[in-house]
Image (cartoon, rainbow, N blue to C red):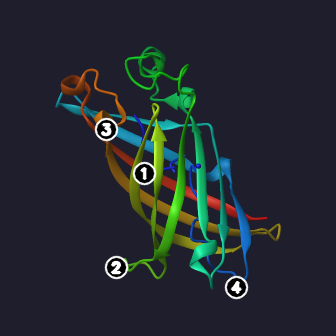
Amino acid sequence: MMCRIIRIFGLGSILSLAVGMAFSADTYQVDTAHTFINFKVKRAGFSYVIGRFTKFTGSANWDESDAGRRSLEITIQTDSVDTGNERRDQHLKSPDFLNAKQFPVMTFKSSNIKKAQVEGYETAWEVTGDLSLHGVSQPLTFVLKQIGRGEDRRGNYNVGLQTEFTIKRSEFGMTNMLQMGGDEVHCSADILVKRQ
């Protein structure tokens, strides 16, 4: 049950993230304390189950002048799924869904990052790559929007990013309880990266 993302979300996941504010190649790390990788799935057609992944790492290499030197990777630990209900979380970690023991991580690795035009955002990127989840890899493309950037009070250069996308869990071999649990997983990631 993962959100198309990320090594997001991991969401990675999030990020040759367009932190392209530098004119030379820079490396960024995901700030896990200020990054959130979330998902929601329809339950029985009545309501949504909302959850998140709490353990992940991510990095990005960014060169503003050379698109070929931009990359994003995210890794998410599947046993960190959290929906606020321990019994449900254990079921999601079981072979019925994520099978976290056999597949302890999901990853996203970019293959191409290019500028995108998004209304209301001065800076955005289209990120294409492969999402690997539950032993299956599928291509994934999402738009990464820049929320803000600049130095914090400690002098660290930060870039805030946001994305949303939808995947089908059946495409990753998770076909159990499709009618009850829903196939579409709506994902979102709010990411903060720091220049190293």
Q: Distance of mark 4 from mark 3, alpha carbons?
A: 39 Å
- Looking at the image, the residue that sits furthest to the top is 87
Quarter holding residue 45: top left
- SS type, badge 4: loop
Taking the image as shown, residue 80 lies to the left or right of residue 167, namely right
Q: Residue at x 46, y 47 (%)?
A: 131
Q: Residues within 10 Å of mark 2 (few under 14, many from 20)?
A: few
User: Which numbered disc covers residue 23?
Assistant: 4
Q: Which mark is residue 114?
A: none
Judge by depth and name the residue closer to the eye, 58 or 83: 58
Give the residue at x 47% y 32%. Answer: 135
At which x and y percent is residue 189? 48, 53
Q: Earlier in the sequence, mark 4 or mark 3?
A: 4
Q: Position of residue 161 (x, y in %)?
A: 53, 64
Residue 183 in sight in this render: yes
Whether the residues at callouts 2 and 4 have beta carbons within 8 Å, the answer is no
Whether residue 77 is situated above or below residue 155 in the rendered picture: above
Amino acid type of the residue tagged 4 in the rendering: Phe
Q: Residue furthest right?
A: 154
| Mark drawn on residue 188 | 1
Closer to us: mark 2 or mark 4?
4
Measured from the top left, where is residue 181 in percent x and y?
A: 26, 27
Q: What is the CA distance from the residue labelled 1 to the residue labelled 2?
A: 18 Å
Nearer-N-terminus badge (1/2) = 2
Q: Which mark is residue 119?
A: 2
Q: CA distance from mark 2 to mark 4?
A: 25 Å
Badge 1 crowding class, 10 Å Cα cut-off, few under 14, some 14 to 19, many 20 or more, is: many
Tell which circle, 2 or 4, labels the residue nearer the N-terminal end: 4
